[in-house]
Amino acid sequence: MQQEENNKQQTKKAKFNLPKGHFLFTSESVSAGHPDKLCDFISDSVLDACLEQDPNSKVACESACKNSLVMVFGEITTHAQVPYETIVREAIKQVGYDNINKGLDYRNASVIVSLDQQSQEINQAVVGAKHEDEIGAGDQGLMIGYASDETPELMPLTHHLCNRLISRLQECRTSEICPWMRPDAKVQVTIEYKREDSSFHPVRIHNVLISQQHDEKISHSEIETELHEHVLKHVLPQKYVDEQTKYHLNPSKAFTVGGPYGDAGLTGRKIIVDTYGGWGGHGGGAFSGKDPTKVDRSAAYAARWVAKSLVASKLCKRVMIQVAYGIGISEPLSICVNSYGTSTEGLDDDDLSDIVQHNFDLRPGVIIRELKLRRPIYAKTASGGHFGRNEPEFTWEQPKIINLSAWKTHKAEQQQQNL
């Protein structure tokens, strides 16, 4: 009996028997039709509708859904005249919920709207009579930015592939390449990495999981075949695929019940999906439904901009930036730079921190101006990730190439003044 138990334990250990210095890391993503992402899209659609008419709108819009009930609630102060219920129904339609059999129908959904104005105390603390560049943070909190040189987009490969799979699944559904697909979907990618000194690099794709909502007419074997043919072959880099790569395609076998009918949805419940797939940490604040005075959003975008700029400038191979704020205070309360020991020879994290402070003004008003964040661009961010995208709206993805010589001159001048 004891020998049998020992054999079981050995079998369990052997399942992930990797070469020394190798490790597995997993990221996930979900489609626009996932109930939580549907709520993100509704909240960001309301935000865009306000910003389109009034760029100075103050918006903190939450959404929730279950079955045919959709609720929109929060605080909005705006001069815009917004037909909230119409915006909500149009958002549901755009995501693809036009039939109750799919999980929701935009035409007969019950929509509840409960929106108040922003607290005057918060408004006074944030804006008051301040110059645009001096506006205070909309709340306290810490925000994280991350970048890695393992992909051209300077995103971790696990999460980059997750977002590409989701994008391809949605393309197959909306273009009717796979007409059996319904809006709800989830993916997961596990990659084997190899450590080399302070850095590491991806070796191979260990496994891929796709759960795609479907109609009742298609068989499980047909789903597996079509996912391989129309999705996996279009996304996975062949240099990372081998005979040992495993595929878990609709492992629950049947996935016809999805969307709000299968699960409740809530704005801001997919914060790791929205960011770096588990890499680099997270400050805890969600993005969707928040105007850019909310540093949960704008400072997280700026932190990504900073991190990407450092890696794009070859100052490190990967890096995490943490920035913290206090409500009504414009200057950050702290800035932390962690390059995980991958900084360019001759530089350390103290130098990188100094470079960041020399090259970036992280006051919320300046972030808003430099990244052009008062535009109605946010509905597009609600699915497919907020980072690692090349569309022109994603200004935080356009790195600032840092002039190291200028920084060294600045540092020498500072040292001279301190003598």
Image: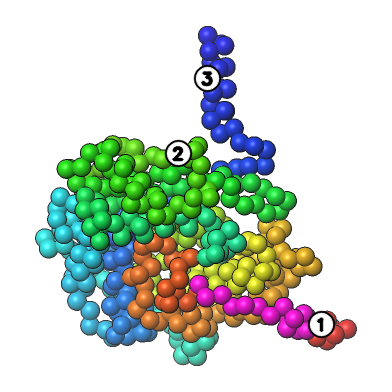
The tag earlier along the polypeptide, 2 or 1, is: 2
Compared to residue 107, the image places residue 215 above or below, namely: above
In the image: residue 397, left or right of residue 33: right
Label 3 sits on what residue type? Lys
In the image: residue 140, left or right of residue 358: left
In the image: residue 359, left or right of residue 416: left
Q: Which residues are magenta?
A: 397-411
The picture quadrant where one finds residue 98 is: bottom left
Write down the residue under mark 3.
Answer: 8
* Residue depicted at 20% across the width and 64% down the height: 93
Q: Could you say whether the residue bearing mark 1 is in a helix, strand or loop?
A: helix
Q: Nearer the viewer, residue 321 or 156?
A: 156
Q: Quarter holding the C terminus?
A: bottom right
The picture quadrant where one finds residue 117 is: bottom left
- Find residue 94 and report its horizontal and vertical position in percent: 23, 66
Within-10-Å neighbours for mark 3: few <14, some 14–19, many 20+: few
* Residue depicted at 48% across the width and 53% down the height: 237
Q: Could you say whether the residue bearing mark 2 is in a helix, strand or loop?
A: strand
Write down the residue under mark 2.
Answer: 246
